[in-house]
Amino acid sequence: MTAAPDETVHATSVAIEGRGVLIMGPSGAGKSDLALRLIDRGATLISDDYTTLTARDGQLLLGAPPTIAGRMEIRHLGLVDMPHADTVPAALAIRLDEAPERMPETVPTIMLAGIALPLVTLAGKEASAPIKAELALRRIGREQTGP
């Protein structure tokens, strides 16, 4: 049985090798576009535009509100049905910014539903953004805990 979400945030999320990546940023920042490019590289959609956050057993679980599960808004194409993952433990948060710091000295964290996640800031519209997201997940992503 899945617990009720603690909160719903304006963010898109994908699963990469079973680890959840939450992509945050203002409208038009490229959240869905980055997610689509990650999906093209093998990621699975969790949720587009709004993601549910549920804290359980020390983990932050990412999910989709039932009304949008398995659907992604792709500019110039509209709503598209996509394969999706139901609930995935979060490992990394990405904040989209047109001018991220070039060489950050530390890896900040963000508290979501009482759980700290590593946070990386990327320019989502850069061609290399999907590769940078995957590298960040491997280097600083939170490891899955529990069963």
Image (tube, grey):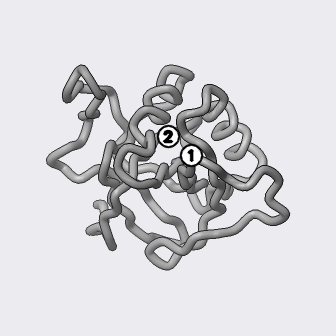
Residue at horizontal 55 percent and vertical 40 percent from the top: 124
- Please give the residue where the numbered disc 2 appears in the rendered image: 15
Residue at horizontal 45 percent and vertical 54 percent from the top: 25
- On the picture, is 39 further left or further right than 48? right
Residue 56 numbered tag: none
Residue 44, compared with residue 21, is above or below; it is above
Residue at horizontal 48 percent and vertical 49 percent from the top: 23
Residue 122, compared with residue 6, is above or below; it is above
User: Which one is nearer the viewer's eye here, 64 or 105?
Assistant: 105
Per the model, the C-alpha gap separating discs 1 and 2 is 5 Å
Residue at horizontal 35 percent and vertical 52 percent from the top: 63
Q: In which quarter of the image is the N terminus?
A: bottom left
- Residue 52 place in picture, x, y as percent: 33, 59
In this view, the residue farthest toward the bottom is 114
- Please give the residue where the numbered disc 1 appears in the rendered image: 19
Q: What is the total number of numbered labels drawn onto the structure image? A: 2
- On the picture, is 86 further left or further right than 22? left
Q: How crowded is the residue under tag 2: few (<14 C-alpha within 10 Å), some, or many (20+)?
A: many
Q: Are marks 1 and 2 in contact (CB under 8 Å)?
A: yes
User: Which one is nearer the viewer's eye here, 4 or 96?
Assistant: 96
Q: Dot 2 lies on which element?
A: strand
User: Which one is nearer the viewer's eye here, 4 or 75?
Assistant: 75
What amino acid is at disc 1? Arg
Q: Dot 1 lies on which element?
A: strand
- Residue 109 place in picture, x, y as percent: 65, 69
- Quadrant of the image occupied by residue 48: top left
What amino acid is at disc 2? Ala
